[in-house]
Amino acid sequence: MLNLKSKIESLLFIAGKPLAPKDMAQVIGEKISVKEINSAVDELLKDYQEQNRGVRIIKSASAVQMTTAGENAATVQNFIKEETVSELTKPSIETLTIIAYRGPIAKWELERIRGINCSLILRNLMLRGLVEERFDNKRKETYYAITLDFLKYLGVSDARQLPDYENLRNNENIEKFLKGEQ
């Protein structure tokens, strides 16, 4: 059960959003049942409460999420405020540029282009209101796109007004790279 708890904890940490136990069971595989997931989640809940940690596991009837501890709300809000008013980092600008020119884009495509995990950068860009996520039910995948606030900030009414938009959006080399042909 310890290994299962560790896997669930990692999924909750990286997801940054509520996860259904059945979805966690599918991702973990290894013939793990939803009942086993729920049992491990209950143990994690208890562990986090007993240890008075800065993060908590919360659970509803249909989903589980990792959140910050309520008593740390002021500290977290100060950090988020600082993070959302400070200048964008170079990795954030690179990620935002890829989303602006290639979006809506799946996380795996974005990470393939950048060569690193983009979860935290995406979270920060969403907190700033520059990027939004959309779930495609047909493909069962989350896609990221720029927001109207992003366009407003740049002073353009459409992403197609970005410099060299068509060339970068439809670049054959990027397409080949994403398909694994290079």
Image (cartoon, rainbow, N blue to C red):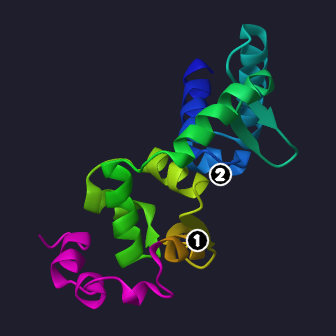
Observer able to see residue 11 = no
Whole-percent x and y of residue 168? 25, 81
Decide which of 84, 29 is in the foreground and name it.
84
Label 2 crowding class (10 Å Cα cut-off): few <14, some 14-19, many 20+? few
Residue pointed to by mark 1? 149
The residue that appears at 45% across and 49% down in the rendered structure is: 121
Under circle 2, the secondary element is helix
The residue that appears at 59% across and 61% down in the rendered structure is: 129
Under circle 1, the secondary element is helix
Position of the N terminus, as image quadrant, is: top right
CA separation in Å, label 1 and label 2: 32 Å
Residue type at tag 1: Asp
**163 inside magenta stretch:** yes
Residue type at tag 2: Asp
Observer able to see residue 149 = yes
Q: Is residue 54 above or below residue 155?
A: above
Whole-percent x and y of residue 47? 72, 15
Decide which of 39, 18 is in the foreground and name it.
18
Residue pointed to by mark 2? 23
- Looking at the image, the residue that sits furthest to the top is 51
Q: Is residue 12 above or below residue 123?
A: above
Whole-percent x and y of residue 21? 72, 45
Q: Earlier in the sequence, mark 1 or mark 2?
A: 2
Horizontal relation, residue 171 to residue 69: left or right: left
From which residue to which does the magenta span run? 154-182
